[in-house]
Amino acid sequence: MRNLIAEAKALHDSSIVLDGHADTPQRFVDEGWNWAGSPLGMGQLSAETAAAGHLHGGFFIAWPEPDAWVGKFAERTRSLIAGIHQQAAKHPQAITVCTTADEVRHAKRNGQYAALIGIEGGHAIENSLDNLREFHASGVRYMTLTWANANDWCGSSGYGGHGGLTAFGRDVVREMNRLGMLVDVSHVSDAAFHDVLETSWVPVIASHSSSRHLCHAVRNLTDEMAQRLAARGGIVMVNFFAGFLSDTWREAWNAMKPERNAALDKAREDFRAQGKPFLFFDELAIERSFARRIPPVPFSVLVEHFDHLLRLIGPNHVGIGSDFDGIALSVEGMETAADLPKLTAALLECGWAAEDLRGMLGENLLRVLKQAQDFAAA
């Protein structure tokens, strides 16, 4: 009898498996949590879960939360980037910071987790191309142009403005091209998405966006958007958050928003009264308690998003963008990075050949990274 999990793990081992988006660096900085050896706790990604999931590396994200860090966006971004480098210095056998595709491959050969660095939210650069250049010099190799908040130069699919790129926004995209930094359109408005594709000289990515055809969250890409991005050589990396995979779950989640916000406000007041900081993972613990009250999304729904995009835009233009350590809950059976072989096994069961899946697992991300860097070098 065919053992699909064993096949999936073997495929992972003979490929390179990368996650395009994980919010783990907040744990390094705010909790003093260690990549190797610390209990997983509320987290989803660690040295141990990555090894169990045959995951070889991925992008760690520096995300300056826009409400908590007003006036200090660049400062917070610097601290998160430094936290990643500190983990590599503390655990050199377990993790190393990479900036090129060749370095990622070398890390895999050495048995090290290949930590690439990304920024989430263009507000991090505080409207300064000098800050953008500084972050690139410190190892950043992609930037998500917005988070749920718009900024002064790019509209968001969330709040604060749904317009496109301003003239300065186009300068940001072109400077990222010049530096060899990937441009990430997850979170941007539809208008900004099309402006970016008209502006960028190299392929762009959607680092953690699922299919709007299957779930109507505006964070996801329509089929037309996915096809246009792929036609320009880019990749769509599927997000694992239940609210971006299932309309039924998302509607139940949104209906809880007043109750969730009240619980979060009370927790913030309690922490303030105790003189304690209210950290992201304190917030996530409350959100996860609400998320678990909703009937779970079947694992097959996550598989369906991958299968749909693989068929729509082809195996050379799809990737993994879990959003681990930044989401309240994924689908049933996808609790941590250790569960990743289940996804590969399910896609093999759908009829995808091993050779079709190597790109999705990581080669597609390395290809676009190399293309961006080759353009910059030229």
Image (cartoon, helix red, strand yellow):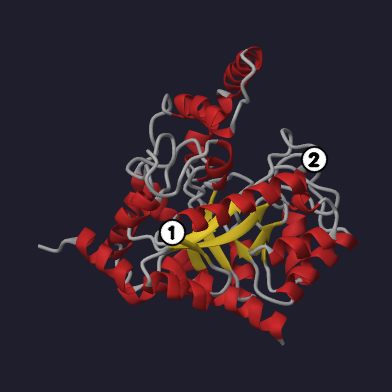
Residue 208 placement: quadrant = bottom right
The residue most toward the left is 1
Q: Secondary structure at mark 2?
A: loop
- State the mark number for residue 138: none
| Rendered location of residue 256, percent (x, y) | 55, 23
| Rendered location of residue 376, percent (x, y) | 71, 80
Going by the numbered disc 2, the residue's amino acid type is Gly
**Residue in the foreground of this view, choosing between 274 and 11:** 274
Decide if residue 377 is on the left or right side of residue 369: right
For the point 35% across and 77% down, which residue is it?
Answer: 355
Q: Which residue is mark 2?
A: 160
Name the N-terminal-most of marks 2 and 1: 2
- Which quarter of the image is occupied by the C terminus? bottom right
For the point 41% across and 61% down, which residue is it?
Answer: 307
| Rendered location of residue 232, percent (x, y) | 64, 75
Q: How crowded is the residue under tag 1: few (<14 C-alpha within 10 Å), some, or many (20+)?
A: many
- Which quarter of the image is occupied by the N terminus? bottom left
C-alpha distance separating marks 2 and 1: 30 Å
Q: Which residue is mark 1?
A: 306
Q: Is residue 212 visible?
A: no
